[in-house]
Image (cartoon, rainbow, N blue to C red):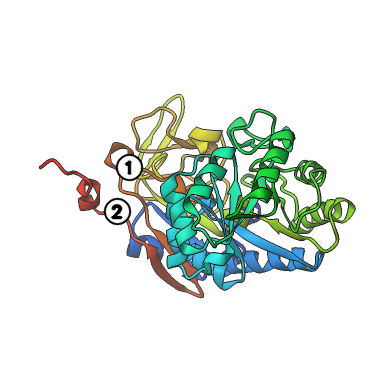
Amino acid sequence: MPSAADLLALFPPGSALDADGTLMIGGCRLDDVAAEFGTPAIVVSEPALRQRARAYLAAFRSRWPRVDVAFASKSFPCTAVQRVMAQEGLHLDVAGGGEILSAVKAGADPGTLILHGNAKTDEELGIAVEHGVGLIVVDNTDDIDRLERIVPAGRRQPCLVRVIPGVVADTHASQATGHAGSKFGLSPDDARRAIDRIERSRVLRLDGVHTHVGSQLLHVDQLAEAVAPIAALGTFDTYDLGGGLGVRYTYTEHAPELDDYADAMVGQARALLPADSRIIVEPGRSMVAASACTLYRVTTVKHGAVTHVAVDGGMGDNLEVSLTGQRFEAAVVDRFGPVGDPVTVVGRHCESGDQLVDGVALPSPAVGDLLAVPVTGAYTFTMSNQYNGARRVPVVFANDGDARLVVRRDTWTDLLSRDVDD
């Protein structure tokens, strides 16, 4: 049976219980956060976020002379999160025009941005070129066609070519990207042709190659397998090894340590890549997931064949359960600990699949209780939606006992703001 300490370990590093047993994150009592900002709300420990960024840089820069860590913004494309990453010296991996613009607003140097996407539009590439994005990852030959039209004469746009490594990832099918037949990237043979074409271009500059196996991988050897296929394509200045390191969501999961990941990737780089090359890694989930939790208010408790504990959020603020079947845990904020009979925590949306946690032990949950679901810093905010007219949730940064709003909750007016037919 898990203990209260086991449950606390799933919350952001530095989380603790106050004298009366109430959960605190970033030195802030979560009942106080709920009183000030309402629920649902994503609460981020800013110290944990910054420490993770520093740990990533230290792990890789201590092992390889030329290395950059690029935060995969798609996992948490909040301007305040991007700002923290830029302040801590990370580059930013952006997917689409919106993430470029939020990164620029966050104060990131456009030259440190890496643009991804399998279906980039003329508009997005135009935004990238206009702002001086440092690297554009060519995912297909249509990207080359568009860039050769858009990049003005006299300029050279640095590019990487994305290569399908042929690695079958041990993860959910929707999170696998490196297998043959993936919609992302080019086969090695097609990549060679794209490389040749870029090298002949008057406006493009080939800096190197990129690869990515998938997301939420819990075995570092699978991530390291991707190095050999791109090494076989030739000698380049830059090798972008992607991201994909998994995290621990539940008591039973065991995620690799950051040092193990760095050892595996750099070990392959030492064996296969030029010693003076630049390598890039692109952590997303493993950078931000554990830095946050989501706070909910219990609205109903229904006893029967299954005890359903319904909260005021759900798949509008966390699609991971419905989309990938990801398991989460939960805690009652002021009666902390995995004790009590198993219940199913469900959301407020009109779908039977709107379930947050199945079979979680909660101590006599009641209407009005605050629930905290840990490890929600990745792929929750970014996929939040307005299903059933739900208002998208706020993001609160907690640091040294101070809680500050960095993204406000939608207003009811926001829900109607795009209507043009009065």
Left or right of 395? Residue 378 is right
Left or right of 106? Residue 174 is right
Q: Front-most of 378 and 354?
A: 378
Q: Report the residue marked by disc 2.
A: 410
- Indicate the secondary structure of the residue bearing disc 1: loop
Q: Front-most of 96 and 60?
A: 96
Name the spot of residue 358 as percent of width and height, x first: 52, 34
Which label is found at residue 90?
Answer: none
Left or right of 305? Residue 7 is right
- Is the residue 277 above or below the residue 299 in the image? below
Name the spot of residue 39 as percent of width and height, x first: 36, 53
Name the spot of residue 282 as percent of width and height, x first: 65, 54
Mark 1: which amino acid?
Gln
- Is the residue 376 above or below the residue 12 in the image? above
Query: What residue is shown at x 55% (from left), y 69% (from top)?
Result: 86
Q: Front-most of 302 and 236?
A: 236
Inter-mark Cα distance, 1 to 2? 9 Å
Q: Are marks 1 and 2 in contact (CB under 8 Å)?
A: yes
Query: How many neighbours does mark 2 have within 10 angstroms: few (below 14), some (14-19), or many (20 or more)?
Result: some
Q: Report the residue marked by disc 1.
A: 386
Q: In which quarter of the image is residue 171?
A: top right
Mark 2: which amino acid?
Asp
> Is residue 371 visible to us here?
no
Mark 1 and mark 2 lie on one chain; the one further toward the N terminus is 1
